[in-house]
Image (cartoon, rainbow, N blue to C red):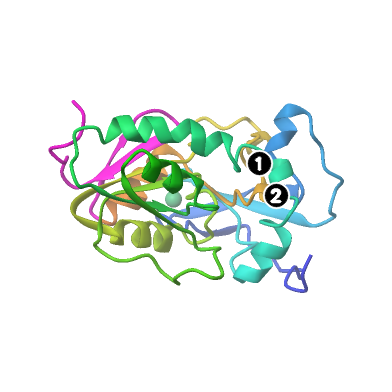
């Protein structure tokens, strides 16, 4: 861990990063807790405790432990060469599984411009281009890319497994929505935990080693996007769409 992982004095209650209501400490896990624990893969303990707070109003579960990390801190300690071991679907399975669903979703749109926000290795955008869609990728962790995505340039922004990774939920949502043209929609995945286990952090998705540092409920997503003037449609606990008005090309 970097020298940034210093001991901090934790407050029992802090403002929620989404709705500003009181969020209280709800548990602590080792930094190396990963999503693969649900498949029986246990990493050696790092010895670094990561505390999470839970909002009493919207239910957001979040940690402040990474609030001051730089991009290079994240690259060194989370999105490093070992990341694929605790998110094996990232490289190929997820983009290959997602691309056909997007192709179907935009089947009625002509000339649509798509941005895959937080697109990682760019695989999904590449598959979509192969299917004839004007798609490009942008990722905040790409050290060689543009520092921000183009604004007001896209009819559809996708963001798969992005919003649980940001320590700044409002800024990230604003940036993703800011890439939309007037009337555009954002389709995104993040798993909401609306009924947490009695010990909240027992949930497999709350995993600092995966960079899962802001975990939503349907309510916290509604509050977040509502504050930015968008409505949400929750297709299921993992897939959501933000819109101001439904575009004509949307499948019925
Ligand atoms: Zn809240």
Quadrant in which residue 57 is drawn = top left
Q: Residue at x 48, y 40 (%)?
A: 190
174 vs 243, left or right, is right
Residue 85 visible in this rendered orientation of the protein = yes
Say what secondary structure mark 2 lies in. helix
Q: Which is more toward the observer, 174 or 79? A: 79
- Residue 232 percent across, percent down from the top left: 29, 40
Q: Are marks 2 and 1 in contact (CB under 8 Å)?
A: yes
Magenta-tinted stretch: 229-252
Q: In the image, what residue occupies the spot 66% across and 56% down? A: 79
Relative depth, front residue between 53 and 75? 75
Which residue matches tag 2? 83
Residue farthest toward the left in the current orientation of the protein: 248
- Is residue 55 in view? no
Is residue 232 part of the magenta span, yes or no?
yes
Q: Which residue is situated farthest in the top direction here? A: 252
Identify which residue is drawn at 65% across, 70% down.
72
Q: Quick one: label 1, few (<14), some, or many (20+) residues within 10 Å?
A: some
Q: How many labels does the image show?
A: 2
Number of residues whose C-alpha sits closer than 10 Å to that of mark 2, classed few (under 14), some (14–19) or many (20 or more) = some
Q: Position of residue 99 (x, y in %)?
A: 42, 35
Image position of 118 (left or right of 242): right
Magenta stretch: helix, strand or loop mostly: loop
Kindly report the distance in space between the C-alpha atoms of the residues bearing marks 2 and 1. 6 Å
Q: Which mark is residue 180?
A: none
Compared to residue 7, the image places residue 163 above or below, namely: above
For residue 87, the mark is: 1
Does the segment drawn in magenta span residue 163?
no
Is residue 57 shown above or below 250? below
- Where's the C terminus, which quadrant? top left
Secondary-structure class at tag 1? loop
């Amino acid at each position: 861990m970097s020298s940034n992982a210093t001991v901090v004095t934790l407050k029992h209650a802090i403002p929620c990063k989404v709705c500003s209501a009181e969020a209280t400490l709800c548990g602590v896990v080792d930094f190396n807790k990963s999503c693969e624990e649900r498949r029986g893969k246990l990493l050696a303990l790092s010895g670094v405790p990561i505390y999470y707070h839970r909002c009493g109003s919207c239910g957001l579960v979040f940690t402040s432990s990474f609030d001051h990390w730089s991009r290079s801190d994240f690259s060194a300690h989370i999105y490093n060469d070992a990341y694929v071991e605790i998110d094996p679907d990232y490289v190929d399975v997820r983009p290959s599984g997602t691309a056909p669903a997007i192709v179907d979703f935009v089947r009625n749109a002509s000339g649509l411009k798509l941005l895959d926000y937080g697109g990682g290795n760019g695989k999904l955008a590449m598959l979509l281009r192969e299917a004839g869609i004007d798609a490009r990728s942008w990722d905040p962790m790409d050290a060689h890319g543009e520092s921000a995505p183009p604004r007001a340039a896209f009819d559809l922004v996708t963001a798969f497994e992005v919003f649980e990774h940001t320590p700044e939920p409002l800024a990230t949502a604003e940036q993703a929505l800011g890439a939309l043209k007037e009337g555009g929609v954002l389709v995104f995945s993040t798993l909401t935990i609306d009924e947490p286990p009695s010990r909240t952090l027992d949930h497999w998705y709350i995993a600092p080693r995966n960079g899962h540092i802001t975990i939503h409920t349907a309510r916290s997503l509604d509050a977040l996007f509502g504050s930015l003037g968008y409505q949400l449609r929750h297709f299921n606990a993992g897939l959501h769409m933000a819109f101001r008005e439904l575009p004509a090309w949307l499948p019925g």
